[in-house]
Amino acid sequence: MGGRPSMEGDVYSYGILLLEIFTGVSPTDERLRDSVSLHKHVEIAYPEQVMDIIDTKLFSTVNREANTYASENVFGCLLLVIQCGLLCSKESPKERITIKDAVKELNSAWKKLLG
């Protein structure tokens, strides 16, 4: 936003990147109108409707009829990754987690995925 580069800015960018990868929505996507940011778009859906915004291309097999996108471990992992993205991309730099904490969050997600 025109400020000096900082660790907090890098964490913000990392969080937005996570959200973009897992939703398939760019921060400049026209679906994000009315001044709704990617962060806010995901925050609104998290956690109850998170599967409604996850990019289904992430899954090799999707049973759309049963609305079953993932096993419990995969779902838990997705929630943790999305949570990490949200924590990294908070508007205020003081509210963001550190990159060290983000790594811990993502390690927890990895462990959840492996069951």
Image (cartoon, helix red, strand yellow):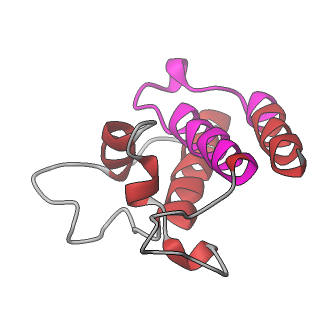
State the residue lying farthest toward the left: 34
Image location (x, y in percent) of residue 74: 71, 53
Residue 1 visible? The answer is no
Residue toward you, 1 or 114: 114
Q: Is residue 113 left or right of residue 71?
A: right
Quarter placement of the C terminus: top right
Q: Is residue 115 magenta?
A: no
Image quarter of residue 31: bottom left
Image location (x, y in percent) of residue 49: 38, 45
State the residue lying farthest toward the front: 66
Image quarter of residue 21: bottom right
Residue sitting at 53 percent across and 41 percent down?
A: 4
Image location (x, y in percent) of residue 75: 63, 49
Residue toward you, 62 or 41: 62
The range drawn in magenta is 73-102
For residue 94, above or below residue 98 = above
Residue toward you, 14 or 113: 113
Residue sitting at 46 percent across and 31 percent down?
A: 90
Q: Is residue 87 magenta?
A: yes
For residue 11, above or below residue 98 = below
Q: Is residue 96 left or right of residue 38?
A: right
Residue sitting at 63 percent across and 60 percent down?
A: 70
For residue 37, above or below residue 30 = above
Q: How many marks?
A: 0
Q: Main secondary structure of the magenta part?
A: helix
Residue 114 visible? The answer is yes
Residue toward you, 27 or 81: 81
Image location (x, y in percent) of residue 88: 58, 36
